[in-house]
Amino acid sequence: MKHFFLITLMLSTIMGCAALRPAPVESISKLSIVRVGDPAPQSTEYVVFYPAGFAFPVTLKASGSLFASEKQVKSQAILAKDLYLYKYWASHDGKTWKNSHELLGVEFGGGFDIT
């Protein structure tokens, strides 16, 4: 059991560090680019392209013991820039790649408004 725990810890550490490596730009540049919604190629490795203006659904949910019932609001978010995604890397131009958490400035906020 002790060995299982150590192996699991090592694997999770290695996998977690993979996102810290620089993007393999040369390898990514050789991949097919598939526009979202188009059929995926035979290859399992490809870049997904979301054009500026692409709208995707967003569901916001309020739940928990504070509330008498769960409430959901469905809306759409529209991209302001082109977005290319490959694994945990992202790009706005398909050439310069960063870890998606670095590149994408996404924030969600909330609060209570009694008016």
Image: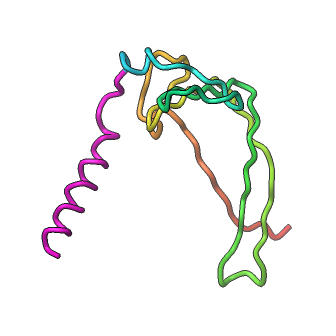
Image quadrant containing the C terminus: bottom right
Q: Main secondary structure of the magenta part?
A: helix
Residue 10 highlighted magenta (yes or no):
yes
Horizontal and vertical percent position of residue 56: 74, 40
Horizontal arrangement in the rendering, residue 101 relative to residue 38 (left or right): left
Residue 93 or 33: which is nearer the viewer? 33
Tell me how the rendering is colored: rainbow
The magenta-colored residue range is 1-24
Residue 27 vertical placement versus 70 (above, below): above
Q: Residue at x 31, y 28 (%)?
A: 22
Q: Quadrant of residue 19?
A: top left
Image quadrant containing the N terminus: bottom left
Residue 111 or 53: which is nearer the viewer? 53
Horizontal arrangement in the rendering, residue 107 relative to residue 7 (left or right): right
Q: Residue at x 47, y 15 (%)?
A: 95
Horizontal and vertical percent position of residue 104: 53, 36
- Which residue is situated farthest in the right direction here? 115
